[in-house]
Image (tube, grey):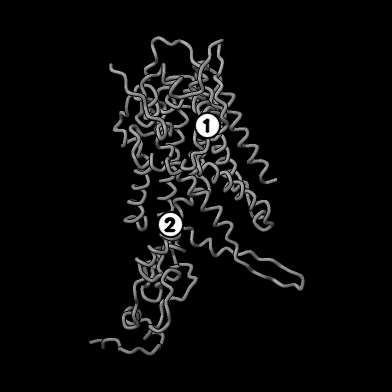
Amino acid sequence: MKYAFPLAAVIALVLCALILVQIPGMQYLFGVVIPYLAMALFLGGFCYRIIHWGKSPVPFKIPTTCGQGYSLPWIKHDKLEAPVNTAQVVARMFLEIVLFRSLWRNTKATVYAGPKLTYESSKWLWLFGIVFHYSFLVIIIRHMRLFLAPVPGVVSLVEIGDSLLQIGAPTMYITDVTIVLALLCLFGRRLVNPQVRYISLMNDYFPLFLILGVVLTGILMRFFLRTDMDINAIKQLAVGLVTFSPTIVAKINPLFYVHLFLVCVLLAYFPFSKLMHMGGVFLSPTRNLANDSRMKRHINPWNPEIKPHSYASYEDEFREDMVEQGIPVEKELPSQG
Amino acid sequence: MYDSGKIIPGLIIFVLLVTIPIWYNHGAGTEPPKPVLPKDAKACVLPAAEIRATHMQLLNDWRDEVLRDGKRAPVLVDGKQYPKSLMLNCMKCHTSQKRFCDSCHTYASVRPYCWDCHLAPVEPVE
């Protein structure tokens, strides 16, 4: 029941916001105080984690190579899988961050009678992951229309593209559909695949449910429960928040505060969770190091400083003792008198 | 700290990206819209709160009923008949597209595609 508790936690958060915001005066807490606190925690926590990681030494050069390393001229070098210089590392990192390239290597192991073990490529994680991440990115860009006044052209352009199908009114967003499907598939994958289910923890399920909660409240607000969903009042609050003069000008449907509260929980939770892979992907030494350990010496930063001690200077230091003990020396003691 | 020459600029770029809304608005933002309401008409086809929340759904339903199903019968509200039409009904009282429709839509970056087919009415003189 590793998923029951996170689900209950998200439901509790929803109910908490839904009930508390009905109390007069609590709108200010949920609309202004909590968003500021959450954003401060997000930015502060994010920077703290990154700097903390930056302070951790990398004792060895540990790139994961999965192709032919740089070798003799007639052996074809796999530049992306075993990069040897900065340009190749940058190309590898770019494809990793933008296309999640390493997930193409995901395999599924199955044991058949015999026993016979087979491995086959399993790209589902890649598919659900990339659909989810890009949908989320588009959704975040779209939301900038509520924070930026006047709305910049690029935000409008993304929005036009996202509602290109012109289904219904307000127009359906393509990313609303794809993010729900991707989240359900990512969750389903953790349930259906026994190995993945075994290693899934509460902190794997919680962000999935939390983001699903954010998405579902957003969809409900836009398409179904529109009463008192005063978009201009919401935008005035959002612009007020980012210009440090927040005002709540009208009564807004409690569902909006639930949506905002779940986003705040997500922001506050972000630096303390696995979601930090957003920053961590840039800092993973198995990806961002060049496979050049035979060309450049990698010095372990925590090596103690050991000065070279040649035999000649060793003998200089201990000559008297060595002669006294009858140990042969290369250079005799200077004759006395 | 190791590789601070790369990590610190990266972190600064991240913080700048996250705080785009703060420096884009220059600490001010724009004035919220004030749509101009008709002076003479008092009633709409739905109560104010409802029409504010669901006018886009209503117009979409009317469009489908009239153009796709051919159901052109007017709607009856409080004994008064209203044609199911943007141009012949809504825009009769809300005469200005710019000062009524667009004032909110532009502020919230909503782009209804009404005017892809309809010709906007001539803007009334001040």
Residue A231 percent location from the top left of the image: 45, 27
- Viewer-nearest residue: A268 or A118: A118
- Are the numbered discs 2 and 1 placed on the same chain, yes or no? no
Q: Residue at x 40, y 68 (%)?
A: A290
Amino acid of disc 1: Leu
Q: Residue at x 52, y 20 (%)?
A: B50
Residue A146 in sight from this viewpoint? no
- Viewer-nearest residue: A112 or A170: A170
The residue most toward the right is: A113
Q: Residue at x 43, y 39 (%)?
A: A142
Question: Which numbered circle lies on residue A283?
Answer: 2
The residue most toward the left is: A337
Question: Which numbered circle lies on residue A308?
Answer: none
Q: Based on the displayed image, in which of its 4 quarters is residue B126 positioned?
A: top left
Amino acid of disc 2: Leu
Q: Based on the displayed image, in which of its 4 quarters is residue A244 positioned?
A: top left
- Crowdedness of circle 1 by 10 Å Cα count: few (<14), some, many (20+)? few
Q: Which quarter of the rendered picture does the N terminus of chain A lie within?
A: top right
Q: Secondary structure at mark 2?
A: helix
Q: Residue at x 38, y 83 (%)?
A: A73
List the residue tagged with mark 1: B67
- Crowdedness of circle 2 by 10 Å Cα count: few (<14), some, many (20+)? some
